[in-house]
Image (cartoon, grey):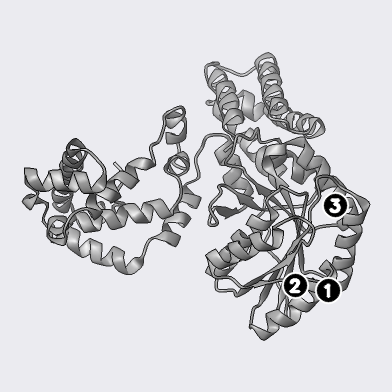
Amino acid sequence: MLEDLTQRLEAVFRKLRGFGALTEKNISESMKEIRRALLEADVNYKVVKDFITAVETRALGQDVIRSVTPGQMIVKIVHSELIRLLGETTTQIKTAGIPPTIIMLAGLQGSGKTTFAGKLGDLLRRKGRHPMLVAADIYRPAAIEQLHIVGKSLNIPVYSEKEADPVAICMNAIGAARQDSCDILILDTAGRMHIDNTMMQELEIIKEKLKPHEILFVADGMTGQDAVNTAKEFCDRLEFDGIVLTKLDGDTRGGAALSIRAVTQKPIKFIGIGEKLDAIEQFYPERMASRILGMGDVVSLVEKAQETVDEEKAKKLEKKLRKQEFSLEDFLDQLQQIKRMGPLDQLLGMIPGLGAQMRGVKVDDGAFTRIEAIINSMTLEERRNPKVLNGSRRRRVALGSGTRVQDVNQLINQFNQMKKMLKNMRKMPYGKMGRIPMGIG
């Protein structure tokens, strides 16, 4: 996420840390490099100008010049100014006193509205809500069918009509939601390849008739300043409540993320970080600023773990570890829980200091798949007692999993090393052992 910008800023900070003391000259030179990095990341030039002025003003203060660690002080200033630029606080979705809460999605075609509708519905359902998706895009070929596919895969109801205008569909969906006891309506409205008056008028009518509790503008994070300019025009006509940035996991320079809030004065509420329907995060300015500066994001990592880990299974696993009964079945279960947390390179990037070290290193998520295939090709007895895996059994497992005997041997060796490590850790006091995440290492 925003990797190019992160690398450029890290280079500037490394140079700053090399100075014994800060002067107006080396601060000015550093600000020029930061300005160049932001502009090349496609950040709005007015936003860059204001940002650099704010950082430079604070950096030239006597507290920084006299600091024992001036380079670190500059990083701290840039971090706090990034947080300010991104919005400082996290903004929640407004909800209705009397259900259903109506959330209207708007944006250009191709920005990812339909997929985001499913992602948002899934996120809200995991929080105990009962969403319904509304197919209000009657113009794009297969748009209604796409939303039905998304809804079916998530087991979320979808309301649609074959012959009706978008306003009537949205109005009728309110009654359908109440009838099905759904407390959230997510309106997937039509987008266009460009802003046109007909589209904006349709959105304005839906807003007037339904009075949505929340209007979210969905922008493609890969389009840079185009997304910012479009957001400004939508905001002028529609006065939306918040912004969603999709595709931030792609080859994006990050300009939209750093510009869109400052230009529209509307908060970023969600970000899309992958193609899967659970690849969505609530937006936290401080966490995003930390990621941009290569500081990691431990809080988000812990939250992902909390959402994924089954507490009952964790307790059972802890008892097994105490009794040294950890088996390949348990190992497989831990791997599957880690996979549900997301791509491994994203998880590693959230660990402070590790993201920079892993840069350029190809993380093979396919290794998890191979391990799963190998363990699934074993009998129940072999999973629970790998000692019985002699040469012929290992050849059978390799053949059944489509791998090599060497791969099976490597897995068994890694598993035995892990058991040995756990045996040594068992001798430590409980308080020092803590809860050990399995499956990585």
Image vertical order of residue 411 relative to residue 211, above or below? above
Specify the label residue 76 is tagged with: none
Q: Are marks 2 and 1 in contact (CB under 8 Å)?
A: yes
Mark 1: secondary structure:
helix
For badge 1, the amino acid type reads Ala
Q: Which residue is label 2 attached to?
A: 161
Residue 32 versus residue 289 in the image, above or below: above
| Farthest residue, direction bottom | 179
**Residue at (74%, 29%) from the top-left corner?**
52
Identify the mark nearer the N-term, 2 or 1: 2
Left/right placement of residue 87 relative to residue 359 reads right
Amino acid type, callout 2: Glu
Labels in figure, total: 3
Residue drawn at x 28%, y 49% as measured from the top left: 373
Task: Locate residue 180, reporting x and y percent.
Answer: 64, 83
What separation in Å lies between label 2 and label 1 (alpha carbons)? 9 Å
The quarter of the picture where residue 131 lies is: bottom right
In percent of the image, x 57 and y 41: which residue is there?
249
Q: Which residue is mark 3?
A: 235
Closer to the eye: label 3 or 2 = 2
Q: Return the residue at label 1.
A: 168
Quadrant of the snapshot with the C terminus:
top left
Quarter of image, res 185 = bottom right
Q: Specify which label sits upstream in the sequence, 3 or 1.
A: 1
Q: Residues within 10 Å of mark 1 (few under 14, many from 20)?
A: some
